[in-house]
Image: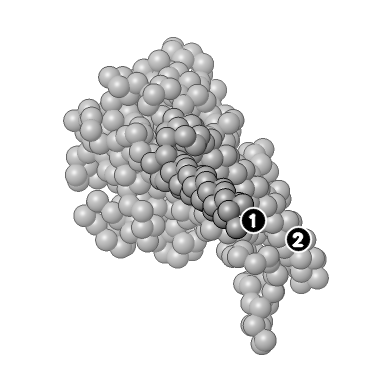
Amino acid sequence: MTTNKTINYEKSNLSLSLSLKKLKYHFNSRNVSRSPYRELSTQTGFTIVELLVVIVVIGILAAITIVSYTGISQKAVASSLQSDLTNASQQLKLYQVDNDAFPVGLDCSASPALNTICLKSSPGTTYAYFPVNNTNPKTFSLSASNGTTIYRISSSSTPTNCPDGFIAVPGSATYGTSDFCVMKYNAKADNGSGVGDTSQTTGSNTWPANTYPISASRKLVSTAAGYPVANISQTTAITAASSYVNNCTGCHLITEAEFLTIVQNVLNNPVNWSGGAVGSGFIYSGHNDNVPATALEASTDDSNGYYGTGNVSPSNQKRTLTLSNGEVIWDLAGNVYEWTTGTIAAGQQPGLTGEVAFAWKQWNNGLLLQNGLPASAMPGYTGISGASGWSSTQGIGQLYSNYGDASTRGFLRGGNWTDGSNAGVLNLFLTYAPSSANTRFGFRVSR
C-alpha cells in the first residue's frame, strides 16, 4: 500500500511538473509574440504613401470648406450691406419729402444735431453720406462698408459694388446715364501683382502699349502706382477695356456720355473751384504745365492732390477732383489724354467757316460753329448757370479742331502734361484718327 501510494504521489508530481513546464512554455511564447520587435514585424498598418494621400485629401477638404465658408460669408456681408442701403435710402427720401431737403448729416447720438438723421445699420457696417441740396433735383449719395466690401447708393439708383480701383459715379439725367463705376486713375498695366508697372517707358513715364500690348497675360489695373498706359489707339483701347480688366464683367472704354457725366458732376461741386463756389476762380486742371516734362504716377493719399507737380494750393495744378458722392478721381484733366468712345465723321468738324488748319478755340467763342459736334459736348449743356460763358480762364480747357478737316476723328479728352491752359475737364482734341497712337494718349475704363 505504501509503495502504491508512493508511486501515485510520484506520478502526481511528475504530472504537475509537466503541466508547469507546459504553462511556462506557453507563457514565454506569449511574451515573445508581444515583444515590440515581433509586433512590428507581424502587425499591419498604413504605409507612408497612404498617410500622405490621407493628409492631401484632408487638406483638399479643408480648403473646400474654407472657400465655401468664405464665399457664404462674403455673400452674407454683401446682402447685409445692400439691405442696409435700401432701408437707409427710403428713410432719406421720406425725410426729404417732409423737409424739402435731405438731412445735412448723420447723427445717432442722444442729442442729435439739427437737420440730421440717424440711420441704423447691421453690426460692422459703416456709412459715408454726402447730401447735395443746392441742385434741382436735390440728391444724395450713401456708401456702406464692412471690411473691404463697399456698396453705394444714390437718390436715383440701387446699391452698386465697384471693382477694385474703381469709384462710383452718380448718373445724370442730362446725359442719360445711370450710376456707373469708373477707374479712379488713368489705366495702368499690371506688373503681375495687381499694381501698375514702371518697368517700361516711352521715355515720358507712360507705359508703351504698342511695344508691350495689353493682353490676357498683361491686365489693366487702376492703381496710384504705375505709369499710365499710352501709345494706344482708340480702337485698341476699346478692345483692351472690354477684355483685359481683372474681375470686371461688362467693363468698357469710357463713353462720351459717361465722361461728360463726371465733368458735369465735378463742375457742379464747389470744392473743385479755387474760389470755393461754382464758377468762382477756376476749376483745377491737373498736371499740364510741363514741369516735370513727363506724365506722373499718382498718390494713394487723396488729400495730396498736388503730388508730383511741385505745386501747392492755390495752383491750378491740383490733380484730384471730388464728386458729389465724396469719391475722388485723379487726372480727369492733364497728365495724359484719354480716349472716349466718341468719334466725329469726315466733314463734320466744328470750327470757323473757311478754316483749313487745326487750331485751339475757346468754348465761348461766339463764332464757333457746332457743325457735327453733339450739343452735349458744349459747356452750356451741363445746365450749370453761367457755364455757356466759361473759357480756359475758368480752367475748363479748349477745343482743338479744323472746320475743313475731311477725316474721321476719335475723341481725346482732358489734355496732357504739355497743354497748359488748353487742358481742362472739357478739353476736346479732334485731330487723330481712331487707329492713331501717341505717347501722350491713354484711357480710362468704366462699367
Q: How crowded is mark 1: few (under 14 residues within 10 Å), some or many (20 or more)?
A: few
What residue is at 44 percent from the left and 57 percent from the top?
272
Q: Which mark is residue 87?
A: 2
Q: Is 146 left or right of 220, judged from the image as shown?
A: right
What residue is at 39 percent from the left and 24 percent from the top?
217
Question: Is 33 above or below relative to 81?
Answer: above
Amino acid tagged 1 = Met
What residue is at 45 percent from the left and 47 percent from the top?
28
Mark 2 vs 1: CB contact within 8 A:
no
Inter-mark Cα distance, 2 to 1: 116 Å
Q: Position of residue 149 (x, y in %)?
A: 56, 52
Q: Is 11 left or right of 411, judged from the image as shown?
A: right
Looking at the rendering, in which quadrant would you find the N terminus? bottom right
Residue 73 showing in the rendered view: yes
Dot in front, 2 or 1 = 1
Question: Is 119 above or below relative to 219?
Answer: below
Question: Is 154 above or below relative to 191?
Answer: below
Q: Where is residue 254 in the image (x, y as percent from the top left)?
A: 51, 33
Of residues 163 and 52, the one drawn nearer to the viewer in this rendering: 52
Of residues 212 and 71, the one drawn nearer to the viewer in this rendering: 71
User: To which residue does mark 1 refer?
Assistant: 1
Identify the image's colour scheme: rainbow, by chain, secondary structure or one colour.
one colour
Q: Position of residue 419 (x, y in %)?
A: 29, 38
Q: How crowded is mark 2: few (under 14 residues within 10 Å), some or many (20 or more)?
A: some
Residue 446 showing in the rendered view: no
- In the figure, residue 260 lies in which quadrant? top right
